[in-house]
Image (spheres, rainbow, N blue to C red):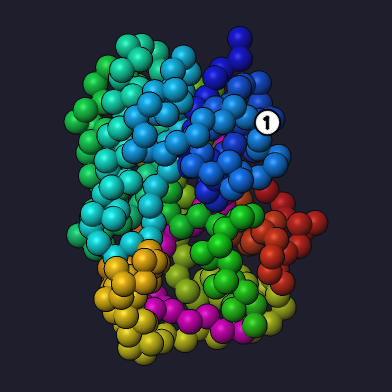
Amino acid sequence: MKQLIAITGGTGFIGQAICRQLLTQDCSLRVLVRDRRKLPLDLQAAELVQGDLADRDSLQQLVEGVDAVIHCAGNVRGATQSAFDRVNVDGSRNLLHAVKATGTTTTRLLSISSLAAREPQLSYYAASKRRAEQLLMNEGDGITWTILRPPAVYGPGDRELLPLFRLMARGIAVTAGSPLARFSMIYVEDLVSATLAWLQGSAGKEKIYTLDDGQVNGYDWHDISRIVGEICDRKVRVVQASPWLFDLPAWINSRFASLSGRAPMLTPQKLRELRHHDWVCNSADFQRDVDWHPQFLLADGLKATPGWPGHHPEQATP
């Protein structure tokens, strides 16, 4: 029998990648969308439920009768704690209550969180992701849940890291923090395959897992620059920017967000995340509990990512 899978955040970078893969599997897909026009044509074969995480009737319709729920929706932009909590915490609570209201104990819930939740003191975003995790841990009794904390995610469809790789392909890597800060990364298709492995298995319940691409001790900016340089056949220079080059626009964004009506990405809070010295993690626990292994180290993932000069899919060897 086909599984019926519900997903939130299906119009986002990670959500679209998961939806595309699910539609190739032996399952049916039901997607929560605020605006049907934002869902690519190739994903509209799914059953669509119009609404958002604040619409409890839509959430009830989304989760009724499903075998599993994949929660990808979240807010990554904003200048206040309430702006993040409204979606990341309150929205998660609404979804959890909708799942519990179905009265079934067989529905499984996978929440795609963020490695930022490990350091909630750094930003409003990180704090909201930690609170959403705690909500699930404290109120998720009666259902089977799992939380995944990916690090920086890149790949086809990414709009946040791709401009950075384009700049690096021109020969310069500008960092907001120390070039020696270390961080893990994961190619989006590896995150998708981890999601599918969770769906197909029965292990990994009621636990928080981190994911990475398998690079021991992650990368620093010199590692990234060397890899990009080898792909693009040029030297990439690492430059640590003067603090004010990032501090000033971040301060302006934060101060004038309410006046402009825009939700900024770069804020003083976000800078604290970017300047944190340690975003290294590993997926050993998930690999042990679930039959999954990452396939793409950074070089191969970058070669498989379109939209920049290093796109060489014929050379990518997962």
Residue at image mark 1 = 45
Q: Is residue 271 left or right of residue 303?
A: left
Give me the residue at 53% from left, 65% from top: 161
Q: Which quadrant of the structure image shows residue 177?
A: bottom left
Answer yes or no: is residue 178 visible. no
Residue type at tag 1:
Ala
Q: Is residue 223 above or below residue 119?
A: below
Give me the residue at 66% from left, 26% from top: 25
Q: Is residue 199 above or below residue 14?
A: above
Q: Please, what secondary structure does the residue beneath circle 1 have?
A: loop
Give me the residue at 48% from left, 82% from top: 174
Give how far across and how far down residue 208 sits, in percent: 33, 37
Residue 181 belongs to the span the image colors magenta:
yes
Q: Is residue 35 left or right of residue 280?
A: right
Q: Is residue 257 left or right of residue 282?
A: left
Answer yes or no: is residue 122 visible. yes
Give how far across and how far down residue 195 sits, in percent: 51, 35
